[in-house]
Image (tube, grey):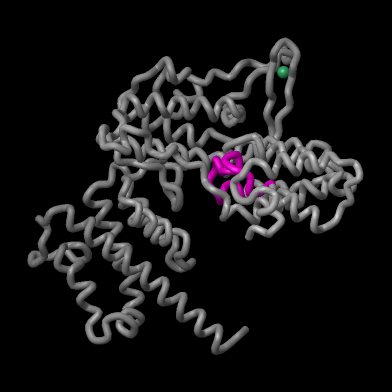
Amino acid sequence: MITSDAKRIGGVRHPAPRQALRSALRTPRLKVGPSRLSRYIQAVAFAGADYQLAWPRDVFRAEATYFLERLQTAQPDWSDRVAFMLEEAFAGPAPRDDFMAAATSGLLPGGQDAQELLLGDLIKRADSLAPASPPKPYWPDRHGARSPHLASTQSAQRRWVRLVGQFHTRGYLDNAFPGVCVDDHTSDRVDESEILEEHLGIPELWPLQQSLPWDNETWFGLIEVLHDLVARPRRRWWHPYAGCGWHYSEFAIEPARRLYRWKTNQLLDLCAVRLRLATEGEDTGRLVARTDEARGELLDRLLTNAGPAVSERISHAIALFRARDATIEDKRSAAIALAGILEERRPLLRERLFRKDEGALFQIANEFDIRHRSASQKSDYDPAFLDWIFWWYAGTVELTESLLAQRRSSDMQLHPP
Ligand SMILES: [Zn+2]
């Protein structure tokens, strides 16, 4: 919500409010009060393209919440760590600068509370912050002079190497490949190629730039190994001696992997390889067959929302079905697993969906050789049928999940705990 204050000092996405506020904050006769504080927050949280999120919202929310709730804000370098995070999470430097300014402005006694307040407010506003999006289409695209095309594998590999380079520059690989400090005369330098060879059995892969181009098997292997190696440093310090540079520490694995999956998947979506890194389920971080967005979301919903009684089976069925090298047998097993869950929910299906004959749902599985093999069954069908049956069952399992959730909520209303 934008208050009249915010409008008066500039309104949405206007850079002026921040400058106005900075100069106001430098005024020594400043009297601290809630209205002034909220006006500060209104102004900074709406201030233009710098405030576009460069991270997915959920990653930002989780990481910012960690700093706000899990770390002692009185720690001497709390501000620096948060500033380092804001620098990464947003498209421009303004959020970091505003955050640092809150400490020195005297907005609240000690400044620290103003920083906490600002960070808390950014978390609350995460849903309304604009995501950093690709640039609007340029002239040739707007005027139909260029037809949409997919990146070639070689160009996608080069882009991915640049992406890994960005992670490396920000210290995300320092946990796996620690740099050696100029003052450290005892540690051996880690051989990156050796580590990659341990995982993939292929020598001389690092530096990546120099081992390009790769065959697909090597590239896909590298994508998966790097997923497992990245970790986000939550702390850094600058060592100026002999140009030593940044030293990173306190590595967090989860935010790094989520960011890596998100960025790598964006890149894979632009190329002809129909694969992406799974983001949920037992195959998280492994390349799986890419489907259209709607079906991908259906699987993510199933993996996220499935009740404890079935979640493991669903996760396994999905991993089998979408594995990069899934065979007909794997897909058949995946469909059988989902059919089994539906079978257990027959009474629910009969009561809520089919009224008379829920058997129709299972007839197709039986006829197409999925559950019971016999001479009368059709086993020479096109494998596309298996895909169709899997998606049909996956959609039906999701439907039963929401029927069960409805039932639970009406039970709660009738019999509150
Ligand atoms: Zn050093």
Q: Is residue 296 left or right of residue 234?
A: left
Bounds of the magenta segment: 44-61
Q: Where, quadrant-wise, is the C terminus in this rendering? A: bottom right
The picture quadrant where one finds residue 27 is top right
The picture quadrant where one finds residue 394 is bottom left
Q: Residue at x 72, y 10 (%)?
A: 242
Q: Is residue 175 visible?
A: yes
Q: Is residue 78 visible?
A: no
Q: Is residue 250 above or below residue 69?
A: above
Q: Residue at x 43, y 18 (%)?
A: 209
Q: Residue at x 30, y 25 (%)?
A: 215
| Residue 352: percent from left, percent from top | 34, 82
Q: Is residue 134 above or below residue 348?
A: above
Q: Is residue 74 above or below residue 349?
A: above
Q: Is residue 411 left or right of residue 367?
A: right
Looking at the rendering, the quadrant in which ligand 1 lies is top right
| Residue 321: percent from left, percent from top | 31, 52
| Residue 17: percent from left, percent from top | 69, 45
Q: Is residue 352 magenta?
A: no
